[in-house]
Amino acid sequence: MIRFRGHHLICLHFFRGEGYNPEFIINLHELIKKVEYGEIIEVSEGADDVCAKCPYLKGNKCFHNRNSEDEIRQMDSKALELLNTEPGAKLNWLKIKETLPDIFKDWFTSYCTICTWESTCDKNPLWLKLNTERLDNKVSRRESMHDKKAG
Ligand code: SF4
């Protein structure tokens, strides 16, 4: 069983082979391969199997910057809320992937716009597709509002 924390349940769908160091990247590749092949994911509260190889993890806490532990936990909470799940739940990676179109707009607005990895994710085909759909929905909503006013 693989342990993933909240925001990894979303963000890792857009992994493009980049990370903090070779050990971290190799671990990520292996974890993603396993969950893509159907290994069950247990939702972790706090540090998970990705964090285990992160150079910023000290004593189970994130020291990427002064506020990172709190910020990441908030990010996890938002991800769990959007995915309608909780720590301890057992999930399937492909099932999570199916829900991404429904939650991407909210996730993008809450986090992608302020994320240092956005310039990496925006080269991932799935991220690009979801973002294009988000923008298309915005345009079509604007057009239908315009139609209503014109009518
Ligand atoms: S841009 Fe950042 S918050 Fe958005 S999916 Fe990528 S890693 Fe996650």
Image (cartoon, rainbow, N blue to C red):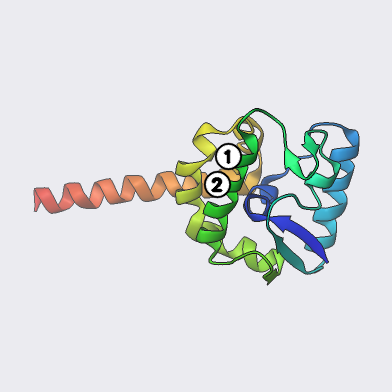
Quick check: 89 left or right of 108? right
At 77% from the left edge and 59% from the top edge, which residue is drawn? 3
Q: Secondary structure at mark 2?
A: helix
**Crowding near the residue tagged with mark 2, few <14, some 14–19, many ≥20 C-alpha atoms within 10 Å:** some
- Residue 105 image point, x, y percent: 46, 49
Nearer the observer, 109 or 98: 109
At 51% from the left edge and 60% from the top edge, which residue is drawn? 81
Can the viewer see residue 18?
A: no
Q: Secondary structure at mark 1?
A: helix
Q: Based on the displayed image, in which of its 4 quarters is residue 24 positioned? A: top right
Instruction: Please tell me how many numbered marks the rendered image carries.
Output: 2
Q: Quadrant of the C terminus?
A: bottom left
Quick check: 68 left or right of 143? right
Tag 1 and tag 2, C-beta contact below 8 Å:
yes
- Residue 17 image point, x, y percent: 79, 39
Nearer the observer, 70 or 101: 70
Nearer the observer, 85 or 149: 85
Residue 71: numbered disc: 1
Quick check: 47 left or right of 6? right
Q: Amino acid at mark 1?
A: Glu
Query: Which residue is the extreme one toward the front?
Result: 59
Quadrant of ligand 1: it is: top right
Identify residue for label 2: 74
Q: Based on the displayed image, in which of its 4 quarters is residue 122 positioned? A: top right
Q: Quadrant of the N terminus?
A: bottom right
